[in-house]
């Protein structure tokens, strides 16, 4: 049996990363180190402990009973160590330099711009570069430190922290509803004029769930397509058809009387709000500080 002093903390951190990422390759990508180094460190940990922790396959790894027990005990402790180190650094180091942020145009207007202004006021030596685009930017090639993304992440090579969730609302203009009537069930949507947001992976297929757990998949047809959430909202306000908006955009327009919510008894899948940063060995103090700040900002909004 290995003595506590023989165990390398880095090996435990890499083991935890493999479990959280689901594979050696994904863990190495997120940490920005070679896959071989991750594999070697975990193998050394298993040798010291005298037991297998992971069962390796070509695509994923699964935990043995010993691995599951070790992860359950160590994960909260490792998280606590990381948090303590980050907090100690934040207290002793004044943030400076440039912080390059990226998000969609709408989210910048609705939330991120206000948060960036408050964060800049707290850290006068920090320069903030806020870039907006409705496309998914390449963080590495464009030099982005942190991207705030809404929806569902598809690039597993990036490191991400989930900050919160948002609902999706089915909406249309009052004039459109007055002209064509209120739909009573998702199955009626195929007969209506849909405006498709082409940024979505499946803009013409939607999964609805009722309060009693009943689900219905609606397949719609779109004559009008658009690649910007802001333009989508504008088209809907002009009575071009019906579609789905995130709750922030929808609530703003509903409160102004420009849109109405349809099928409120049916819920669409919630989307996530993520802080995404590129793979690398080190996450700067300014990025860690902004992630913590923005999580609190969103929760208090």
Image (cartoon, helix red, strand yellow):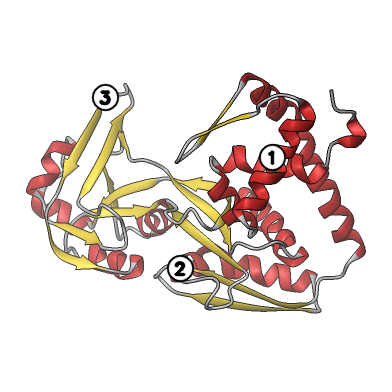
Element assignment for label 2: loop
Residue 47 in view of the camera: yes
Residue 9 % position (x, y): 82, 42
Q: Earlier in the sequence, mark 2 or mark 3?
A: 2
Residue 119 % position (x, y): 72, 68
Between 231 and 156, which is closer to the camera in this rendering?
Answer: 156
Judge left or right: residue 15 versus residue 30: right
Q: Tell me the mark number nearer the camera, choosing from 1 and 2.
A: 1
Dot label at residue 104: 2
Check disc 1: other Cα within 10 Å, few if <14, some if 14-19, many if 20+.
many
Marks 2 and 3 sit apart, C-alpha to C-alpha, by: 33 Å
Dot label at residue 214: 3
Check disc 2: other Cα within 10 Å, few if <14, some if 14-19, many if 20+.
many
Judge left or right: residue 200 versus residue 81: left
Quarter residue 175 falls in: bottom left
Check disc 3: other Cα within 10 Å, few if <14, some if 14-19, many if 20+.
few
Marks 3 and 1 sit apart, C-alpha to C-alpha, by: 45 Å
Dot label at residue 42: 1
Quarter residue 195 falls in: bottom left
Element assignment for label 3: loop
Residue occupying image coordinates x 58% and y 70%: 113
Element assignment for label 1: helix
Between 219 and 138, which is closer to the camera in this rendering?
Answer: 138
Residue 18 % position (x, y): 61, 41
């Amino acid at each position: 049996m290995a003595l506590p002093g023989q165990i390398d903390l880095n090996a435990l951190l890499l083991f935890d990363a493999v479990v959280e990422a689901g594979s050696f390759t994904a863990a190495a990508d997120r940490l920005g180190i070679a896959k071989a180094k991750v594999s070697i460190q975990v193998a050394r940990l298993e040798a010291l402990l005298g037991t297998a922790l992971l069962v390796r396959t070509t695509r994923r790894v699964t935990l043995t009973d010993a691995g599951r027990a070790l992860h359950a005990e160590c994960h909260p402790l490792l998280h606590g160590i990381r948090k303590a180190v980050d907090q100690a650094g934040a207290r002793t180091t004044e943030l400076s330099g440039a912080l390059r942020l990226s998000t969609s145009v709408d989210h910048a207007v609705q939330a991120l711009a206000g948060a960036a202004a408050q964060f800049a006021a707290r850290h006068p030596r920090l320069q903030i570069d806020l870039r907006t685009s409705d496309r998914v930017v390449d963080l590495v090639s464009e030099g982005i430190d942190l991207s705030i993304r809404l929806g569902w992440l598809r690039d597993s090579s990036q490191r991400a922290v989930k900050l919160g969730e948002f609902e999706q609302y089915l909406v249309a203009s009052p004039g459109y509803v007055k002209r064509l009537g209120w739909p009573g069930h998702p199955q009626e949507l195929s007969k209506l004029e849909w405006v498709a947001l082409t940024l979505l992976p499946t803009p013409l297929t939607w999964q609805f769930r009722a309060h009693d757990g009943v689900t219905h998949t609606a397949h719609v047809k779109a004559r009008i397509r658009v690649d910007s959430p802001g333009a989508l909202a504008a088209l809907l306000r002009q009575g071009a058809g019906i579609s789905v908006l995130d709750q922030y955009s929808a609530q703003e327009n509903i409160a102004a009387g420009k849109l109405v919510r349809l099928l409120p008894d049916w819920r669409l899948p919630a989307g996530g709000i993520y802080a995404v940063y590129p793979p690398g060995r080190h996450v700067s103090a300014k990025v860690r500080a902004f992630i913590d700040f923005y999580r609190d900002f969103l929760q208090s909004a």
